[in-house]
Image (spheres, rainbow, N blue to C red):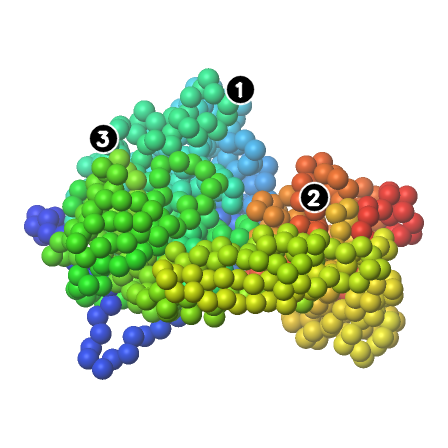
Amino acid sequence: MKANKRILVTSMLSVALLIPAIPGADTLAKDKGEKEKVPVFENASVHDPSFIEVDDQYYVFGSHLAAAKTNDLMKWKMVDLGVRDGNKLIPNVTEELKETLEWAQTDTLWAADVIQLADGKFYMYYNACKGDSPRSAMGVAVADNIEGPYEDTGIILKSGMWDEPSEDGTIYDATKHPNVVDPDVFYDEDGKLWMVYGSYSGGIFIMEMDEETGKPLPGQGYGKKLMGGNHSRIEGPAMMYSPETDYYYMFLSFGGLDAVGGYNIRVARSKSPDGPFYDAEGNDMIDVKADPNLPLFDDKSIEPYGVKLLGNNLFEKKVGDPGQDPGIGYVSPGHNTAFYDEDTKNHYLIFHSRFPERGEEHEVRVHQMHMNDKGWPVVAPSRNTNEKEAKIKRKDMAGDYQYVNHGKDISADVKTSEQITLKENGKVEGAVKGKWKYGKENEITLTIDGEKYNGFFLKQWDEAAEEYDTTFTALSDKGVAVWGNRMEDMKDKEVVSEVKKDLSISNSDNLFQNVELPTEGTHESAIKWTSSNPKVIEADGTIHRPAAGSGDGKATLTASIQAGKKKDTKTFQVTVKQQASEPEIAQYNFSDPGSKEAADSSGSNLPAQLNGNAVQTEDGKLALDGKDAYVELAPLVADAEDFTFSARVNWQGGVAWQRIFDIGESNGKNMFFTPSDGSGKLRFTIHNGVDQNITTDEALATGEWVHLAVTLEGDTGKLYVNGELAGTNENITTNPSDILGNTNYLGRSRYAADAFFGGQMDDVAVYRKALSETEITELAN
């Protein structure tokens, strides 16, 4: 590959010819007798990734002084992470960038960008922002090696200087002037150096840069405005020139970056790097901004504009489909970078994303893009696997598809797939209706509800099915993207068989909360339920726990499965646990040295299991080594609406996101307690679709015993440190009983990327009531 960010000028021969290639790295070519190779992915977590290629190695740099690298755009390895002294990128960062951090009144850095200039050195454009205001600073650090160490050359821009002259000499106005973050520095096709930047506030700006110094040419102020303003939620600009079309494409993220922010990737294009930029409907993006007469962060004013390439989406797994629940998809994908590869003639999109039912966990993803016949990029639905080019046969185009329409809205809603069928006769049936046709170079033209979409059929790796199959991606003249993922061809008898085989009820012998019983299987098959004992569990999965002391409830659930005229049934014996009565759920004192079981002294009989190198010490403590040691707790350890967790903790320190506890059903339903989050604060979070947090002003102290307690009562959560109230949140609407599950740990996170807890614990107790402040103080003393 040839994609070094230092040289964006490519052969103009392909521009002159303007011949679109068959989508290059999107389809799989196989020699006769050769087996399909199974792609191997290794994921990395770099928020706001910015791309650069150096000596056949590909790097992304992002926020929080994070970087990762790969040699194949599939298997990533972290370079370093965290704004801390010792980070190899800037080893003395707190001193080196002291002026920037102090100006921005923060201890972290935002989205960095790195480029190699003509002198062969690497220039890192770092930036820091206060967060709740556009008080930011941007500067340049330089290194001889891509992985550092980088040395600061000084701040180049500042913003957020209320009531003071700004970079252009006028008094700073956050509705008109930019927030100086999110830089992307690039060469245009003529070898001229530019920087595009901005987030929210006054919009997106571009500046001419001095190649000798890596800094802006003098006399520009903040540069030229390209779009945005009035605090519109537009940020993370990234520029890509395509020799296929002779356009500059400016990619942007609209919306908010968190899991409920509706982040999505959009694009506009221009014949010049400094605009004007237009969307697919011909709108000049300079006019796109929030309405100042509406509440702050008015998304409705901006969501009609720009070509929306992708947003929240889910190719949903239904019963009988391959893969794992809930399926394959993205939540708040954004802050991307994009590049054109000279060797393969492919376009690539690199971005971070969160995921359905995984909260705020995020990873880097790479997808290929292809220029449709209107000169707009369409994004491949599945992640890049470096497949080779191949022609797709018509019979592999027709069939049933999971279909996603990304729309134009900015919303936390996830666009869940619906089933459509591309019929052999050219008709589209199912959730939407219309017609389709294909071209010689795998092109697809869809006409749906009178709207025409242009794009490509692709042959891609289906992560769920673990095989290569057909997908399609297309874009309308209004800038709306649609995706399709072809499903396996199945007869009705096969459908019923697959649904029956896949249908299950988790922990059916130990139910303590309502069960979501599926009513639809793969290929639009139907599932209907009946219960032998509705007083214990109803046909819709609603349970009724017997009163304490009356014994567990028993019932038989029967599922009737039908596809076409084919039918079958499957039965499940279920046990619904009786209600608990005692206020103390569990108490662990770790007083059995050498044993791998920690006794529950509360009387509830909920023993805990020690794993890895976890040990109960001679003096009655739980010792966790920070490597593989953790304790597994019983499923009913959080069986409560009001709740208290109490423990003595001695933390040995280390990286963020270790867990004191992590309790719940899944990545989408859980609660956890961490000694230090990404902002260096002691934090409790309960998550049921959205994070609800209680935080303190600083991380948990290290090397000393500290009593910690969390209480939940009604909508109020409180966090205590050594008996003193240290944090409160009066808007916690999720109860522990809402997130009950079987993955409950002391010392371990449910996310594999998080480190194990290192230190000791003692007197761990859990209650189904909120202890009073007096009671907490007594425990602390």
Name the foreground residue: 151 vs 509. Answer: 509
Q: Do the residues labelled 3 and 1 touch (CB within 8 Å)?
A: no
Q: Which residue is drawn at 40% across and 42% down?
A: 264
Compute the Cα span from label 3 to label 1: 38 Å
Left or right relative to 148: residue 708? right
Q: Residue at x 50, y 23 (%)?
A: 295
Residue 265 lies, in percent from the top left, at: 37, 43
Residue 756 lies, in percent from the top left, at: 65, 65
Q: Quadrant of residue 745?
A: bottom right
In the rendered view, tell whether residue 529 sits above or below residue 258.
below
In the rendered view, tell whether residue 40 sits above or below residue 754.
below
Mark identifier at residue 282: 3
Residue 562 lies, in percent from the top left, at: 42, 61
Whether residue 525 appears in this view of the structure is yes
Query: What is the three-letter code of the residue carrying label 1?
Result: Asp
Q: How crowded is mark 2: few (under 14 residues within 10 Å), some or many (20 or more)?
A: many
The residue pinned by badge 1 equals 163
Q: Mark 2: which secondary structure?
A: strand
Please report whichever mark, 3 or 2, sits nearer to the chain's N-terminal start: 3
Q: In which quarter of the image is residue 268?
A: top left
Q: Are marks 2 and 1 in contact (CB under 8 Å)?
A: no
Compute the Cα span from label 3 to label 2: 46 Å
Please report whichever mark, 3 or 1, sits nearer to the chain's N-terminal start: 1
Query: What is the three-letter code of the residue carrying label 3?
Result: Gly
Q: In which quarter of the image is residue 216?
A: top left
Q: Which residue is drawn at 85% across and 75% down?
A: 592
The residue pinned by badge 2 equals 694
Name the foreground residue: 542 vs 690. Answer: 542
